[in-house]
Amino acid sequence: MWENYLLAIAGTDSNSSASESATLWESIVDQAPGLIANWAPRVGGALVLLFVFWLASRMVRKLIFAAGEKGEVDYHVVRLME
């Protein structure tokens, strides 16, 4: 499966670095739509998951501060619990 993600240089002349870089660039451009199609849902899912856990942490933080104020716990102790 990892072969699909490697940038293969096919049919290049080993004597010319300009043709190698042009072929490499063409290979990148040719494979870009497939790579974007394969990785976009994964990156999007990771960003959604990151946002969900960030939101949950903010809610739990507010809950801890509210419980600390209600229980009249010292502010420094409440900061240690978050």
Image (tube, rainbow, N blue to C red):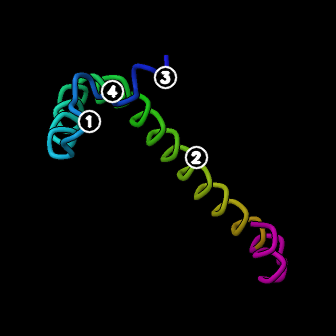
Closer to the eye: label 2 or 4: 4
Task: For mark 4, give the secondary structure.
Answer: loop
Identify residue for label 3: 2
Q: Is residue 24 above or below residue 33?
A: below
From the viewer's perspective, is 27 left or right of 41?
Answer: left
Q: Which mark is residue 8?
A: 4
User: Mark 2 and mark 1 in contact (Cβ < 8 Å)?
Assistant: no
User: Mark 4 and mark 3 in contact (Cβ < 8 Å)?
Assistant: no
Closer to the eye: label 1 or 2: 1
Total numbered labels: 4
Q: Mark 1 or mark 2: name the one nearer the start of the chain.
A: 1
Instruction: Tell me where residue 75 sits by quadrant.
Output: bottom right
The CA distance from mark 3 to mark 2 is: 30 Å
The CA distance from mark 1 to mark 2 is: 50 Å
Q: Which mark is residue 14?
A: 1
Q: Which mark is residue 53?
A: 2
Estimate the x, y position of residue 53 in percent, counting from the top left: 58, 46
User: What is the magenta range?
Assistant: 69-82
